[in-house]
Amino acid sequence: MKISVPTRYKLLAAISLASVCFAALPATNAAAQDLIKVKVGDTTSLAQLGMYAGIQKGIFKKHGIDIERIAIPGGSKVLTTLLSGDIDIGYLASSTSLQAQFQNRPVKIIGMSHNMEIYSLLGRNEFKGKIKQPSDLKGHTIGISAIGSGSWAFAKFLAHYGKLDAARDVKIVPLGNMMAIIAALKTDRVDTVTLWEPGTTMALKENAGYAVVDLLDPAQHQKYVSSPHSMVEVILAKEDLIKTKKDMLRKFFAAQNEAYDWLHKTPMEEVAKAVAPIVGESNMDVLVAALKRNLGGVPTVATVDEATFNVTMKNLVETGIFKEPIPFSKSVDNSFAASR
């Protein structure tokens, strides 16, 4: 059969296009196979916003990292999961991370996730005018996520600040995740709770309670912490991973730092749409408000600042959570945190 010239050109073009498509398929599959899978555990908090943005905007994959995120209720459980080897990297409160180091667990802080205290103390509405400051907590209950978590450390800090004995003057009650804490406040199970974003904004919008202490207010942060910054939420890894997965960590932090940059340059309404599926908040007004309050603590780079570390350590020792300070050099490995 004779093929006309125009038809021949069409056939050749189709064959060429098919060849290009089939040639591209192995490359695409290879690219997917080349991604380094990293299991990450966190507590579902806006203090881990950089990681959420990095996942949702494809920034980690751009840098060759495929994140498998595992939501875990409470920093102490994140730590346990990290130590068991079920996750590679943990996002959790610095107080929990430092506890592990005091116990000689083989972990290091390898980056900063949030550098401004995230916690608030909310009271039941019936106590408004009665519980106005930490010293008024005497004889009352404080709901937290779990013993050993950041919310637990904050409750102990408040008792110390109010010159109270955390073991005798107040009762600290473990409740579980953020939603369980809000529910306990609504149902009068506890008198006060320690919360974080977006939980604080959600509870206040729902009129579940009122703010007694709010450390996302810069003035209150300075009053209670004696510094505009604090080592609040950190990125933790086991020492053997740090030694054996250096290329992975460089790529991981290059993505983390690009995500921080994106957050500081992007309208919060756009950020809210991106992270809502992870945070689990469908009310955009609540989420945008929480994000705006939270943005001041998002770092520009994941490097752990030594001065901020020392301020945090001083407060933890004075609170009685730790008997003595742990040296910065023993606790932190900044080798990868500034990667770009």
Image (cartoon, helix red, strand yellow):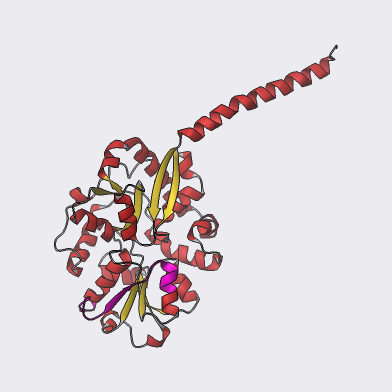
Q: In this orientation, which residue lies closer to the viewer: 306 or 18?
A: 18
Name the residue located 20 percent from the left edge and 66 percent from the top edge.
Answer: 321
* In the depicted structure, whether residue 165 falls above or below residue 60: below
Q: In this orientation, which residue lies closer to the viewer: 279 or 257?
A: 279
Q: Can you tell which quarter of the image residue 42 is in?
A: bottom left
Q: Which residues are magenta?
A: 162-182
* In the depicted structure, whether residue 13 falls above or below residue 255: above
* In the depicted structure, whether residue 179 falls above or below residue 21: below
**Residue 222 visible at all:** no
Determine whether, in the image, residue 297 is placed left or right of residue 8: left
Q: Does the magenta segment cover residue 216?
A: no
Q: Can you tell which quarter of the image residue 35 is in?
A: top left
The spot of residue 286 in percent (x, y) is 51, 68
In the rendered image, which quarter contains the C terminus?
top left
Residue positioned most to the left:
324
Q: Does the magenta segment cover residue 177?
A: yes
Determine whether, in the image, residue 23 is placed left or right of residue 320: right
Q: In this orientation, which residue lies closer to the viewer: 85 or 210?
A: 85
The spot of residue 247 in percent (x, y) is 35, 35
The spot of residue 12 in percent (x, y) is 74, 18
The spot of residue 168 in percent (x, y) is 21, 80
Name the residue located 41 percent from the left edge and 61 percent from the top edge.
Answer: 45
Determine whether, in the image, residue 33 is placed left or right of residue 304: right
Name the residue located 44 percent from the left edge and 80 percent from the top edge.
Answer: 187
